[in-house]
Amino acid sequence: MTGEDTMTRPALTRRRFVWSGAFALGAAALPFSPRPLSAQTPVGLQLSWLHSSQFAGSYIALERGWWSEAGLDVSLMPGGPNAPVEPPVVSGSALVGISAADYTAAAVEEAAPFKILAVAMQKNPFVVASLPANPVNEPADLAGKRIGMALANTPVLQALCTLNGVDIGEIEIIPTQYSAQPLLADEVDCLLCWETDLPVAMAMQGVESLTMLMADHGYAVHSQTYIATEDSLANRRDELVALMAGEVRGWEAYREDTDAAAALTLEMFPDAGLDLETQKLQAARQVPLMFSDLTDEFGFGWWTDETVAANIETLALLGRDVSADLWDRSILEEVHGV
């Protein structure tokens, strides 16, 4: 959720899960060069939200022609509050969707045949945002505080508290819309939100805020994950490899020049109501979430058995029982030549 209306957006959650039961940017050199498919094969990439620099790596891949060079005609399908990721992937209208491990786990519990192929955000973007005069620097600081959040995110807060030995009963939960206004009006002491939206919106208004990244305190849930069906893994591997190879190139180029990535976003989507300076700040703040020592060593989208184990532990606190075979790294290994 990254549009410029995030200060007042009336959404209950950043991306509500709806499961219907229906099944001159440069690029880092890659060890893998996808072999072109026999023709321009149309495929869909279902985004998790509305167009913004949150997905600028994909825009770069499209604009630079890296997918068409590999024989793919890629459609970038915007998401939104009424456009969940999972159903289009199950139906086949999208080859790949950008989701999150908790949403995918919920869908798999309903018999959706998904696998996670790659992890864009190495750190979950959930933060507790506060103001310098009344800071929340660590989970223990939440005791006695009023936190503004969607009630639907109570399991997220509970998981953070459990991981850090904090009694959630000592925190006053104030139901709020997805807006910074309750914090600015002193109606709450802090907000549960994403690092890349409400804090950015406050910064654009000249308001300094502090963010406690929940991932730094044990909250391990892979976000902005790429999902596909087991059938696609079995029967459309060449397309999956070509699509993900373009994504990798696009995001590595994005990392090299986030301002240019933000400018491209506005160029490609001039009617999306986006502000360039806001998009630049959002794009820059996304980098430390997406890139790490792990991606520097192995490549964009990577994960390890250890990070999966941490995800399984946190997902269990969210009421999701998953196993490590939810993650399938075979496509990514082919892309990175591992």
Image (cartoon, helix red, strand yellow):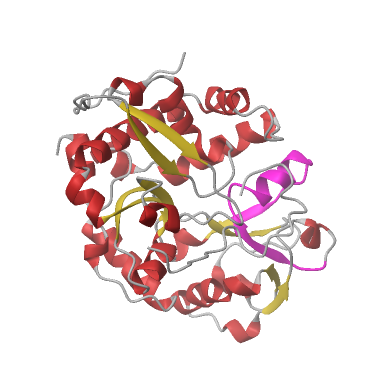
* Image quadrant where one finds the C terminus: top left
The magenta segment is 187-211
Q: Residue furthest right?
A: 185
Observer-nearest of 107 and 261: 107
> In the displayed structure, would residue 299 be above or below residue 189?
above
Does residue 197 appear left or right of residue 322 in this picture? Answer: right
> In the displayed structure, would residue 273 be above or below residue 152?
above
The percent position of residue 278, horizontal first and vertical second, equals: 68, 35
The percent position of residue 177, horizontal first and vertical second, equals: 73, 63
> In the displayed structure, would residue 175 be above or below residue 9?
below
Which image quadrant is residue 62 in?
top left
Give me the residue at 51% from left, 41% from top.
286
Give me the residue at 38% from left, 52% from top.
89
Does residue 82 appear left or right of residue 90 in this picture? Answer: right
Q: Within the magenta stretch, is there residue 195?
A: yes
Q: Within the magenta stretch, is there residue 202?
A: yes
Does residue 12 appear left or right of residue 226 in this picture? Answer: right
Give me the residue at 68% from left, 51% from top.
198
The percent position of residue 333, horizontal first and vertical second, equals: 18, 42
Q: Residue furthest left?
A: 338
Observer-nearest of 136 and 295: 295
